[in-house]
Amino acid sequence: MKKPDWVIEKERAKRAAATETVWLFGLHAVRDALLNPARAKLRLVVTKNAADKLAEAIGASGLAPEVVEPRRFDAQVPLEPENVHQGAALEVRPLNWGKLADIAVSGKGAPLLVLLDRVTDPHNVGAILRSSEVFGARAVVAPLRHSAPETGALAKTASGALERQPYLRIGNLADAMEELKDMGYVLLGLDGQAEVTLGEALAEVGDRPLGLVLGAEGPGLRERTRTTCDRLVRIPYGGGFGSLNVSNAAAVSLYAASIRPR
């Protein structure tokens, strides 16, 4: 009996995911990946200067580096010309952080999550991962489609946080939000036009588990994402311009959530 097309497509996607690799670059991103025992490491290409700077991490990883001349580096590694690699690049498998439900219930830190709705810029997501680690969020969650994948640019902007801060890409964001609400999470959606301020909403949330939901710059939150939030809130501003970059909005929101009244 012939398998249905959807089953064949799912199996094909699973096989592709099993063989997917990512090139990380830059001293910070490569060092932290080398030191991460959960990261499957395949190939390390470094210049002599970078190898000296990463000597401790290379030794701990057990991975034999390929030391190349600086002028031959670009020919050995498939990076974009604009990538500032600092003489270090590491081919790895994407991280597997497990299930959202497990992290939401028993992950490290306070029950605080960041949910991203179609935020596709890897630099923004990398910065959000970094802020999430600083302020103790359990995970950053994004849809599998129309979100920034795990890339070298994202890892470099995250400055090592990608190795420690769970970044979960799930099938359907609104369904995941409903699941989180069933677990007791309160979901606050950031919207510049909302009547309630973030501070006011956080005072009401108290010590309950919290999810901060942010949309892409420009379009903002999709309609279903908006209606699935428990409340829409805004970050108050004092000047004539009240819009923040999404990564800055995430940092401000995470800080406010970390000091909220309990």
Image: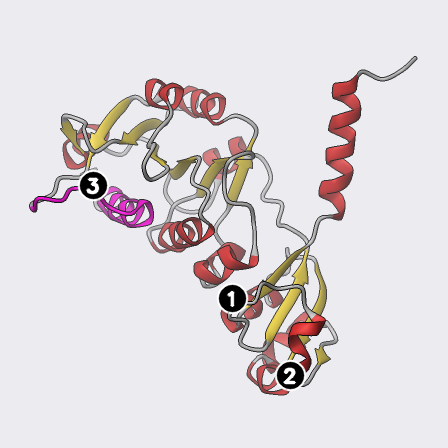
Tell me the number on the disc at residue 82.
Answer: 1
Answer with left or right where residue 81 lies relative to residue 192.
Answer: right
To which residue does mark 3 refer? Answer: 260
Picture quadrant where residue 42 is located: bottom right
Q: Name the image quarter holding residue 231.
A: top left
- The answer to which of 118 and 38 lies nearer the viewer is 118
Q: CA distance from mark 3 to mark 1?
A: 41 Å
Q: How many marks?
A: 3
Q: Residue at x 18, y 39 (%)?
A: 235
Of residues 61 and 188, the one nearer the viewer is: 188
- Give the residue type that dot 2 points to: Arg
The x, y position of residue 25, in whole percent, is: 57, 67
Q: Residues within 10 Å of mark 1 (few under 14, many from 20)?
A: few
Residue at 39% in and 38% down: 113
* Mark nearer the N terminus (2 vs 3): 2
Q: Circle 2 — which element?
A: helix
Q: Which residues are magenta?
A: 239-258
Disc 2 vs disc 3: which is toward the camera?
Answer: 2
Q: Quadrant of the N terminus?
A: top right
* CB within 8 Å, label 2 to label 3: no
Q: Residue at x 33, y 27 (%)?
A: 187
Q: Is residue 247 magenta?
A: yes
Q: Main secondary structure of the magenta part?
A: helix
Indicate whether 141 appears above or below 171: below
Amino acid at pointer 1: Glu
Q: Are marks 3 and 1 in contact (CB under 8 Å)?
A: no
| Local crowd size for mark 3, using a 10 Å CA cut-off: few (<14), some (14–19), many (≥20) | some
Q: Position of residue 158 (x, y in %)?
A: 45, 58
Q: Please tell me the numbered disc located at residue 71.
A: 2
85 over 12 or under it: above or below: below
Q: How far from the left and from the top, in percent, is residue 246? A: 32, 44
